[in-house]
Image (cartoon, rainbow, N blue to C red):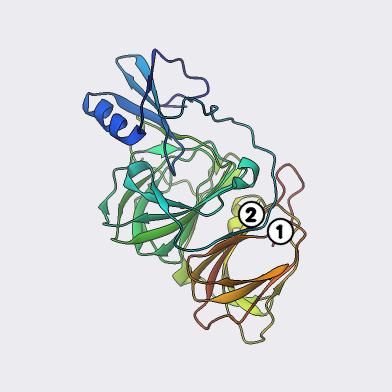
Amino acid sequence: MAGATDESTAPRDLELICTELNPALDLLRELGLRLDVIYPADCPHTAMLSHAGRTVRLTSRPDVPLPSRGLPAFQPEFVLTLAGNSSDEGRAGMRYRDLIPGRLGGRYIASHITIVEGGPVSDWVHFHHVAFQLIFVRKGWVRVVYEDQGEPFVMRAGDLVLQPPEIRHRVIESSPGLEVVEISCPALHETLADHDMALPNGRVDSGRGFGGQHFLRHVAADTPWTPLHGLEAQETAISEATGGLAEVRTIRPGISGGEEFPPHGGELMFGFVLEGTARLHCGEEHKLAAADAFVVPPGVPWSLSDASGDLRLLQITTARVGQPRTKCA
């Protein structure tokens, strides 16, 4: 691991406890300390910094356990998160809205991330110890760059990237009002700086593996709509890129009217309403509108009805970690 030290194993010369992390972090960086680790991304409370061979742990939550490299036990539950719930100031000036507050036992985190003003993003080359992570653009555009993937590129609404474990990457700039949906497993993971790598790094190796997965860039404008459970879907190649760990698609109304989904046998079944309205049937009936999110437990059938013509639904499913990987939609 170049340029960063894992918080769970790092020696520390000093620990500082603060009331709010971000102001204290800004002060220490102005004094010349280098940020090496920060977590969690959605509402940071702990950072590791270094200077002249010395390390400092800065935290507003000394009571919180250190991140673990292991995966917490999956705890299924039905979740419905309506639009309008509050967002927190996350890392690099981004706003994070929590879409799975209970985190399914700490297994998954889903965030609706916004950058209000746009322009350059105060990000740095970094990576994460994760089992699964993807970014989907809901509105606007964002310019990003990834290790061994050539020059920076722009993602637009409907586009996504799979970020395989430990791939170095950086967010460069965005449009005003950028909105993305991010899913990660496990929920609690560090953002580790790589101070030794500059991106782009002058290499293109599309076949390179990262932790058993491959980087994937999905471009919505190049993807046809195909039938799915009476609706239509833009499929992605996430299943191939993850070795069957996950599947991701965007769904819109079809012509047959059938909108029933069979129970899934994996872990996560996550839906995010990109646009439009519908009714979700999962035990009870729930009205869905733009920016609402839901999770359906494994083995539970669900359906949609009264979908508006402009409905667009992001659906993400995952297999059972540690079990044989099969189609999980």
Q: In the rendered structure, find residue 303 and report the number of the disc placed on it.
A: none
At a point 46% along the width and 64% down the height, the residue shown is 219
Residue 246's disc is 2
Q: Is residue 58 above or below residue 162?
A: above
Residue 134 on image: x %, y %: 51, 52
| Residue at 67%, 60% in the rendered image | 296
Which residue is the site of mark 1? Answer: 328
> Residue 153: in sight, yes or no?
no
Q: Observer-nearest residue: 4 or 273? A: 273
* Left or right of 115 in this view: 287: right
Look at the picture and state if 22 lies above or below 177.
above
Seen in the picture, residue 34 relative to 205 is either above or below; the reply is above
Q: What residue is at 31 percent from the left and 26 percent from the top?
A: 34
Q: Earlier in the sequence, mark 2 or mark 1?
A: 2
Image quadrant where residue 124 sits: top left
Vertical side of 234 occupied by 185: above or below: above
Disc 2 secondary structure class: strand
x, y percentage for residue 203?
40, 43
Badge 1 marks a residue whose secondary structure is loop
Q: Residue at x 70, y 69 (%)?
A: 284
| Image marks 2 and 1: residues in contact by CB distance under 8 Å | yes
In the picture as drawn, the residue positioned furthest to the bottom comes out as 255
Quadrant hosting residue 86:
bottom left
Question: Identity of the amino acid at label 2?
Answer: Ala
